[in-house]
Amino acid sequence: QVQLVESGGGLVQAGGSLRLSCVASGLSFSSYSMGWFRQAPGKEREFVAAIHWSSDSTYYLDSVKGRFTISRDNAKNTVYLQMNSLKPEDTAVYYCNAVVWKSTAGVFRSWGQGTQVTVSS
């Protein structure tokens, strides 16, 4: 059974930074491209960023390009999201999931509990 556990969220002022982590288990992590998603109150979950299983390629939601960086450590079954220059509109619960490369949809039906990011103005 796939399990995804996100952490690292918190309350930060606009312009600040946070680093999110997601530890995955129950899958061959190094074989999957991984992504981050977010869901703001009253909105649908949206794709944020993805990284190829080989770590040699990434893609991002336009509104986070240049501010967020996705990375991974296959030895630790962990994917990261470094978020800089945070804006109030980045406030959301952040989730990770596997992705089919170049898609913006999660692979696994079961999502983790997410980690709350709140950016104050």
Image (tube, rainbow, N blue to C red):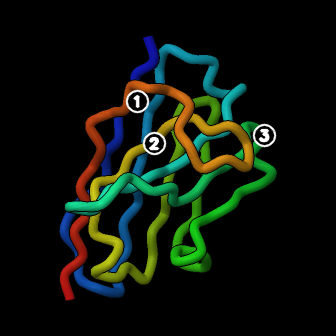
Task: Give the side of residue 62 with respect to residue 117, left or right.
Answer: right
- Residue 46 or 64: which is nearer the viewer? 46
Residue at the spot of label 2: 96
Q: CA distance from mark 2 to mark 1?
A: 7 Å
Secondary structure at badge 3 equals: loop
> Looking at the image, do the residues carrying marks 2 and 1 touch, with CB atoms under 8 Å apart?
yes
User: Residue at horizontal 48%, vertical 63%?
Assistant: 82
| Residue 23 found in image quarter | top left
Query: Which amino acid, by three-letter code, is at mark 1?
Result: Leu
- Counting residues from the start of the chain, the first of labels 2 and 1 encountered is 1
Tag 1 secondary structure: strand
Residue 14 x/y as whole percent: 29, 85
Disc 2 crowd rating (10 Å Cα; few below 14, some 14-19, many 20+) is many
Q: Percent x, y for residue 34?
A: 60, 41
On the image, numbered disc 3 is attached to which residue?
A: 54
Q: Position of residue 40 (x, y in %)?
A: 28, 62
Q: In what quadrant of the picture does the N terminus appear?
A: top left
Q: Give the residue type at disc 3.
A: Ser
Real-space Cα distance between discs 1 and 3?
19 Å
Residue at 19% x, 69% y: name it.
11
Q: Position of residue 2 (x, y in %)?
A: 45, 18
Q: Is residue 110 left or right of residue 113?
A: right
Q: Which residue is mark 1?
A: 4
Total marks shown come to 3
| First-in-chain label (1 vs 3) | 1
